[in-house]
Amino acid sequence: MQRTTVRLDEHLLVQAKEYASRHRRTLTAVIEDALRALLARSQTTPAGSATTRRLRLPVSKHKGGLMSGVNIDSNSELLDLMERGLPLDKRR
């Protein structure tokens, strides 16, 4: 067994001490168990996936593509198309 110094957030230390007291364990035992659990979990999951989740993006079920005559390479034409039918005071 080796002795070391660890700097902990004050609030975290208070919580850890309270946990140890409630479970009749030493602070050292609580910290050792937490480290063992973290290291075991990191060995069973791919690197970086412990904190990341797969994000599911919604996908439209509509088919048909672009309207005819739409030029997606021209911002001004797209803006004109989107504003078509709007009163002048609502246009940019």
Image: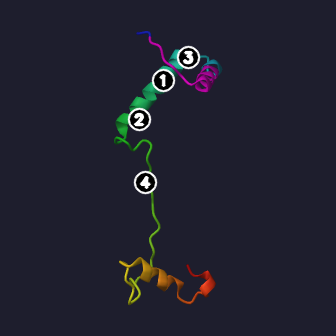
Q: CA distance from mark 2 to mark 3?
A: 21 Å
Marks 2/1 in contact by CB < 8 Å: the verdict is no
Which region shows up in magenta?
Answer: 4-19
Q: The residue under label 4 is which amino acid type?
A: Arg
Q: Residue at x 48, y 17 (%)?
A: 6
Provide the residue designation for mark 1: 33
Amino acid type at mark 3? Leu
* First reached walking from the N terminus: tag 2 or tag 3: 3
Q: Nearer the viewer, residue 52 or 36?
A: 52
- Residue denoted by label 2: 41
Identify the amino acid type marked 2.
Arg
In the image, what residue type sits under mark 1?
Asp
Quadrant assignment for the N terminus: top left
Examine the image and state in which quarter residue 66 appears: bottom left
Which one is nearer the viewer's eye here, 80 or 48?
80
Q: Nearer the viewer, mark 4 or mark 1?
A: 4
Image coordinates of residue 19 in percent, x first then y, are: 62, 23
Residue 9 magenta-drawn? yes
How much space separates mark 4 and mark 3, taking CA atoms? 36 Å
Q: Which residue is mark 4?
A: 54
Q: Secondary structure at mark 1?
A: helix
* Alpha carbon distance from label 3 to label 1: 10 Å
Sequence-wise, the earlier of marks 3 and 1 is 3
